Image (cartoon, rainbow, N blue to C red):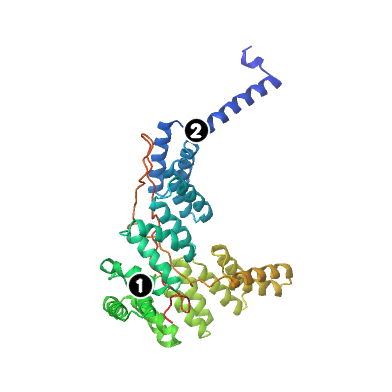
Amino acid sequence: MEHGAQIAGPRRLRLVRSIAAACAVLSILPLPAADARQTFEQGQQALDRGDLTAAEKDFRAVLAAEPDNIGAHGNLAVVLMRRKAWNAALAELRAAERLAPKMPGIWLNIGLVYYRQADYPQAIAPFESVLRDHPDSTQARYLLGLCYFFTERYPDAAQTLEPLWPRESGNLNYLYVVSIAANKAGLAELDQRATARLIEVGENSAEFHLIVGKAHVARGIYDRALDEFSQAARIDPRLPFVHYFLGTVYRRQNELEAAKREFLQDAAIEPEVAYNYDALGAVCYTLNQIPEAERYFKDALRLDSRQAASDFGLAKIYKQQGKYAAALEALRAAEFQRALPARPGPVRHGAARGRQDRIQCSRPAKAGHPRRTRTGDERPAPPRPAPGSRGSVA
């Protein structure tokens, strides 16, 4: 009989458990320095190709070996930002900031975490810090100017954004924001210059018709607004916001099926924008399509828990269904959100990853170990505020 076969019963079980325990210990031992360096590079490559699962695994392995690795903290934060795990991303960035408090790239991404959640007041200080140390950072300047704009600090917005004129004066959305900020701040020359340039650049573009249509909405001229939005949609049917505004006008005119159709089209273009689902819920509720209304209100709150109107909508539905405890909970959530400071309406945050300010870490790395961290990973597209929201043409 083979010797291995003689190890039976409890003895064999103890042996198997001992081997398994030893393997488990080996699997959690910190990586050697050379392996950590290689793992960091693998994580960087995975992040560059968009493999977030592999990137997260590699950066966590590096941090297990070297908890003070600034680059691993920073790049893990980028992974979490792309997953919209904002609190976890902020925790990693704060860990990096404690290790390198003067590193601008960390502060840029801290600001982006707040910006992407529409928490513009909190985003201001990090962006100001970057711009103070790196006045040539166009990304920090653009984002800071937008934060000033959304918090109604119009003179600061105009002053911050005007130096970008040579670079951005062909950008309709930049001109739109600057013209409003200058007008609100009483800067007549900049207002006239931005408005004239807006008309010159816009010509017959879809974006220009969208902007003109929003101006008509703000003034209550819905027929002309509908014409402008329709022209924009014919030129570019996938233009973000154009179907949202068409739906808004149809809803005001009580053409609810047409409104629903437009909101669904905008949701198909940008499925992660909560405002479309909030509007769909309201339209379906009015059409007495209650199961659909409930689903859309829940979708809106899943994407943005601060949608008070969706909480109110659910409260009405639950009350009708006799679910009084659920109705009361939804009503309390809505009242809590209504008590918070007002924030801008729907804003698109398209991530254009091309133009980035990559500020390298100024702190020396350990010998042979990279400290690179991605900064400014998600450059938001310029905003398109909703009618009646802060920063709109009103």
Q: Nearer the viewer, residue 95 or 281?
A: 95
Q: Earlier in the sequence, mark 1 or mark 2?
A: 2
Q: Nearer the viewer, mark 1 or mark 2?
A: 1
Q: Judging from the image, what secondary structure is the residue with disc 2 in? A: loop
Q: Residue at x 70, y 67 (%)?
A: 326
Q: Let me know if residue 124 appears in the view.
A: yes
Q: Judging from the image, what secondary structure is the residue with disc 1 in? A: helix
Q: Residue at x 36, y 34 (%)?
A: 368
Q: Residue at x 38, y 42 (%)?
A: 371
Q: Nearer the viewer, residue 270 or 335?
A: 335
Please determine whether, in this image, residue 358 is positioned above or below residue 262: above
Q: Residue at x 43, y 35 (%)?
A: 36
The image quarter containing residue 286 is: bottom right
Residue identified by numbered label 1: 158
Horizontal and vertical percent position of residue 238: 39, 70
Horizontal and vertical percent position of residue 197: 27, 77
